[in-house]
Amino acid sequence: MRETINSMRLYFFLVGGVTLLVNVAAISRAGTADISVIVVVSALLGLFGAAFFYAAITLKNAVMHARTNAIRVILYVNMAANVLAGLQSLAADTVRRNTEVIRIIIALAIGLYLLANLKRLVKNHAVPVGELAPASPPPVPATPDQADAQDTDAE
């Protein structure tokens, strides 16, 4: 399946919204009495929600101008965070080992899929640099005689 700019924007908005909602809910459930590990981790993960909103908002312009480095970094960091969270869960809970391994594989597959589609979108939709500049530079005279002839024509 080939993603379009709009379908990728929709994905980034949905993932960003769900990430923000889940982590705000986790912070509110933790309470305000003390700052626990849950609050800190949820706040950091909430940043991914904001990053995905940023990716959704800037995607079209980034693709058109082939400036997708920030979006690629967001996807790479998200994949790394998913792997680290999965490895932490594997270490803490040996009962759900197969589930965590599958979750890590799915998270990596989605990330790689999005990176491949981002690359394809840039290739297909980026405005060529030549179209932003003049089509060709002004002609340069080949001989000094032609340069003198152009100078006299200009007078």
Image (spheres, rainbow, N blue to C red):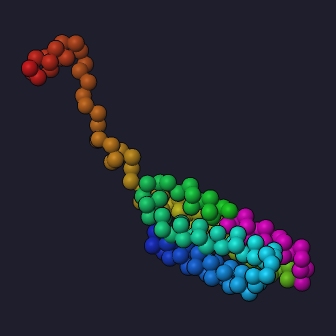
User: Is residue 86 in the magenta section?
Assistant: yes
Q: In this view, does 26 lie above or below 64?
A: below
Q: In which quarter of the image is residue 60?
A: bottom left
Q: Which residue lies most toward the front here?
A: 33
Name which residue lies at 48% across and 64% down: 58
Q: In which quarter of the image is the C terminus?
A: top left
Q: Is residue 124 above or below residue 109?
A: above
Nearer to me, 145 or 40:
40
Name which residue lies at 69% across and 66% down: 79
Residue 14 x/y as whole percent: 56, 79
Q: Is residue 83 above or below residue 140?
A: below
Q: Viewed as shown, does residue 148 lie left or right of 133?
A: left
Q: Count numbered badges in the picture.
A: 0
Q: Viewed as shown, does residue 25 lie left or right of 97?
A: left
Q: In which quarter of the image is residue 147?
A: top left
Residue 3 x/y as whole percent: 50, 71
Nearer to me, 140 or 47:
47
Residue 69 x/y as whole percent: 56, 55
Name which residue lies at 57% across and 58% down: 70
Residue 149 x/y as whole percent: 13, 17
Q: Is residue 28 above or below residue 4?
A: below
Part of the protein shown in magenta: 78-95
The answer to whether residue 105 is seen in the rendering is no
Name which residue lies at 76% across and 72% down: 40
User: Is residue 122 in the magenta section?
Assistant: no
Nearer to me, 32 or 24:
32
* Magenta segment main secondary structure: helix
The answer to whether residue 98 is seen in the rendering is yes
